[in-house]
Image (tube, rainbow, N blue to C red):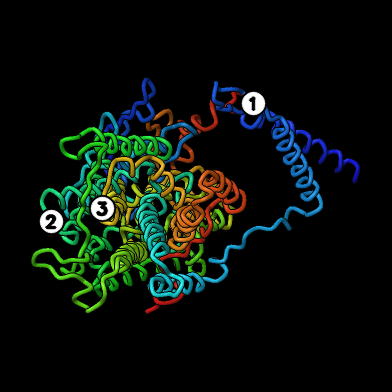
């Protein structure tokens, strides 16, 4: 018995080693060396041997481990949300409280607040996409298009018409929602993979238009000098322009560049929390329930008199609106935007945040955004391994929690309490 | 039956390429009555249902639903409008519940339009106005009533997909009833039920007929259900009507026996 197990494990290990060697040979085995005279090909077969040995031994050990531990004792990440329904609420408030206090904590320096701002942008985008993908079940690979529409809406309105950020913010949301509906119409009949492909194309169309419509968008050079937001007319500059007061003067503070960074942090925090509040609330409303019903079964929706056209368009428009808000914030924070900021990889990261977090889970999105956007920012030195970690995290999640970090769904209404007259 | 029938199907023809799934079919369904549509496999029963509920558009024919306030032509409406405006509800042969939503949520979604109006397209609800919470309370009460009727009150907060098969069937009927239909179309509601569940279904359906005063249209293979509860039976074969009448008469109709069992043996006769 034990001999047979050992033999099977050995076989598995050798097979793993062979596959690893075959894969590693072209990737690790050869290397172009740029010497003074010419390019030469160097070989490093020892690396291939190492890779094969590590994979083979690992596979062998894993096989033995699997045989030693019964399948039902293989550790599975517990579903905390299902076990402690209150824990999610507590964790949510704790995270919100921590986010509010963050800029004033002793260890918070300017770069930390800046990174937190970036993470919050992705949290907000994740929450926006969660409406489309998590609730309505419409796989959208071109979400960055709406982010771009929001960013360019603000940038163009501000630089050409000289409108203020606070006036442009709702307008950017409306424009993005309009584009959401525009995208929605042609894809109404599509589902799943087909929908994903068309939305992917839509995202690229927007980027290509921004890149090539030079007269309007200044093409690949982008738009610079985008005005910064003000706080009720107080500006965050060292010297007040004509007819304005600076924030520092008004509150009798010494001017510091940190003020603006902290202010921006609070703006995006407020916007993100608004998105969250909206989603939590709309889930309990007829339209939110209709989104979820559409995700579950479109034909059943029709048989109950729900018009799928309206439901899909409203989901696209709502998700796009929040991307538009996030986009205009991005524009005002950077002060400069170009089509390069709105490539497909951004859509992929946002979608990964939603999927990794657990479709439809609000806290899951925050955790995933910290993981996918926050960590790479803190470990910038490891830049070249970033995609490796990214892929590794995805594989682990698919193995352990195929439905995402926090995938437990609580009913939006219960008969037990509250509903009883 | 001098009054107008509830549903008047006239010369409906549904072709798929060269195949006449439903061929020049006419029949009526009365209010406060259970009309059963039976026939061998492939006779066109489900196609007929899909025509009535708008999932297919028949090439020829007219389907009139006579409401108290006037007739509605079903073939001119989209499927979701047939449910919302003509108030025809249906269930499916392969159960179609919102599996990852709770039992109660399934019934609340069925009352979407009423709640949408009450919440002013969700805006009033978003602002937390009391008008919406009142409407939601009414919706929950209605859901509670139907859950009680189908015996699922204790499972209201469970995921619909986790219920046993028989309960899912009953939940689907409850969900259809939450849309306040005037005509309820049931596609093989007894399929996969055990004899006890089948009996419960009979009393549920006759109860709906007698108390709600609506018409029921039923596709069924289970003859114990059909013969027991239906007031009128329409028999289809190859898309055409071969017989119709009261269940007792249909049972002995030679054309029906022929369609189901084939030509009787000479020796046996």
Of badges 1 and 3, nearer the viewer stands: 1
| Closer-to-camera residue (A282/A390) | A390
Q: Subunit of mark 1?
A: A
Q: Is residue B183 visible?
A: no
Q: Residue at x 26, y 29 (%)?
A: B60
Q: Earlier in the sequence, mark 3 or mark 2?
A: 2
Q: In the structure shown, which secondary structural element does the residue marked by tag 3 occupy?
A: loop
Q: Is residue B260 visible?
A: yes
Q: Subunit of mark 2?
A: A
Label 3 vs label 2: CA separation? 15 Å
Please tell me how many numbered marks the rendered image carries.
Answer: 3
Badge 1 crowding class, 10 Å Cα cut-off, few under 14, some 14 to 19, many 20 or more, is: few
For disc 1, the marked residue is A42
Q: Residue at x 31, y 47 (%)?
A: A312
Corner quadrant of residue B25 = top left
For disc 2, the marked residue is A163
Of badges 2 and 1, nearer the viewer stands: 1
């Amino acid at each position: 018995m034990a001999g047979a197990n050992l033999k099977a494990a050995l076989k598995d290990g050798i097979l793993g080693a062979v596959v690893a060697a075959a894969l590693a040979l072209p990737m690790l085995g050869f290397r172009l060396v740029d010497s003074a005279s010419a390019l030469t090909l160097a070989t490093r077969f020892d690396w291939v041997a190492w890779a094969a040995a590590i994979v083979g031994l690992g596979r062998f050990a894993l096989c033995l481990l699997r045989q030693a531990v019964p399948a039902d004792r293989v550790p599975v990440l517990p579903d905390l949300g299902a076990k402690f329904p209150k824990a999610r609420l507590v964790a949510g408030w704790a995270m919100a409280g921590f986010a509010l206090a963050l800029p004033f904590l002793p260890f918070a320096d300017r770069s930390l607040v800046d990174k937190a701002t970036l993470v919050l942008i992705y949290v907000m985008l994740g929450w926006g996409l969660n409406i489309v993908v998590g609730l309505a079940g419409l796989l959208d690979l071109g979400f960055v298009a709406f982010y771009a529409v929001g960013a360019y809406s603000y940038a163009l309105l501000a630089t050409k018409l000289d409108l203020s950020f606070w006036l442009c913010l709702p307008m950017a949301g409306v424009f993005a929602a309009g584009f959401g509906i525009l995208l929605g119409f042609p894809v109404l009949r599509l589902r799943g993979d087909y929908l994903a492909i068309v939305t992917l194309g839509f995202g690229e169309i927007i980027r290509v238009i921004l890149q090539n419509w030079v007269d309007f968008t200044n093409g690949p050079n982008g738009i610079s000098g985008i005005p910064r937001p003000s706080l009720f007319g107080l500006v965050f500059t060292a010297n007040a322009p004509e007819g304005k007061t600076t924030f520092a003067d008004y509150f009798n503070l010494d001017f510091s560049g940190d003020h603006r960074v902290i202010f921006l942090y609070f703006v995006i925090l407020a916007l993100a929390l608004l998105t969250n509040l909206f989603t939590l609330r709309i889930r309990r409303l007829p339209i939110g329930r209709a989104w979820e019903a559409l995700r579950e079964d479109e034909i059943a929706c029709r048989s109950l008199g729900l018009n799928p056209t309206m439901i899909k368009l409203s989901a696209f428009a709502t998700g796009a609106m929040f991307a538009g808000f996030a986009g205009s914030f991005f524009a005002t924070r950077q002060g400069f935007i170009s089509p390069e900021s709105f490539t497909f990889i951004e859509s992929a990261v946002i979608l990964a945040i939603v999927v990794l977090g657990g479709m439809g889970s609000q806290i899951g999105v925050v955790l995933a955004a910290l993981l996918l956007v926050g960590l790479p920012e803190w470990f910038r030195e490891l830049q070249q391994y970033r995609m490796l970690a990214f892929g590794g995290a995805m594989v682990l999640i698919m193995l352990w929690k195929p439905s995402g970090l926090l995938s437990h769904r609580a009913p939006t209404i219960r008969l037990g309490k509250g509903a009883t007259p | 039956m001098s009054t107008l029938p509830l549903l008047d199907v006239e010369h409906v023809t549904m072709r798929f390429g060269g195949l006449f799934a439903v061929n020049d079919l006419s029949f009526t369904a009365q209010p406060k009555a259970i009309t059963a549509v039976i026939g061998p496999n492939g006779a066109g029963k489900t196609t007929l249902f899909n025509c009535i509920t708008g999932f297919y558009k028949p090439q020829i024919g007219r389907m009139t639903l006579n409401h108290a306030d006037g007739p509605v032509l079903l073939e001119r409406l989209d499927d979701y409008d047939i449910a919302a405006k003509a108030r025809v509800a249906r269930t499916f042969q392969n159960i179609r519940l919102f599996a990852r939503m709770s039992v109660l949520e399934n019934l609340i979604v069925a009352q979407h339009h009423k709640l949408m109006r009450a919440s002013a397209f969700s805006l009033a609800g978003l602002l937390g106005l009391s008008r919406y919470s009142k409407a939601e309370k009414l919706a929950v009460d209605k859901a509670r009533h139907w859950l009680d009727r189908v015996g699922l009150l204790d499972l209201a907060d469970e995921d619909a997909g986790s219920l046993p098969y028989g309960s899912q069937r009953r939940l689907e009927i409850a969900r259809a009833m939450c849309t306040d239909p005037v005509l309820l179309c049931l596609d093989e509601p007894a399929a996969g039920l055990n004899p006890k569940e089948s009996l419960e279904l009979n009393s549920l359906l006759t109860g709906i007929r007698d108390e709600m005063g609506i018409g029921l249209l039923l596709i069924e293979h289970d003859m114990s259900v059909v013969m027991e509860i239906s007031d009128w039976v329409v028999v289809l074969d190859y898309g055409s009507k071969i017989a119709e009448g009261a269940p007792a008469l249909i049972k002995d109709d030679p054309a029906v026996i022929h369609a189901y069992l084939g030509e009787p043996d000479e020796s046996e006769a």
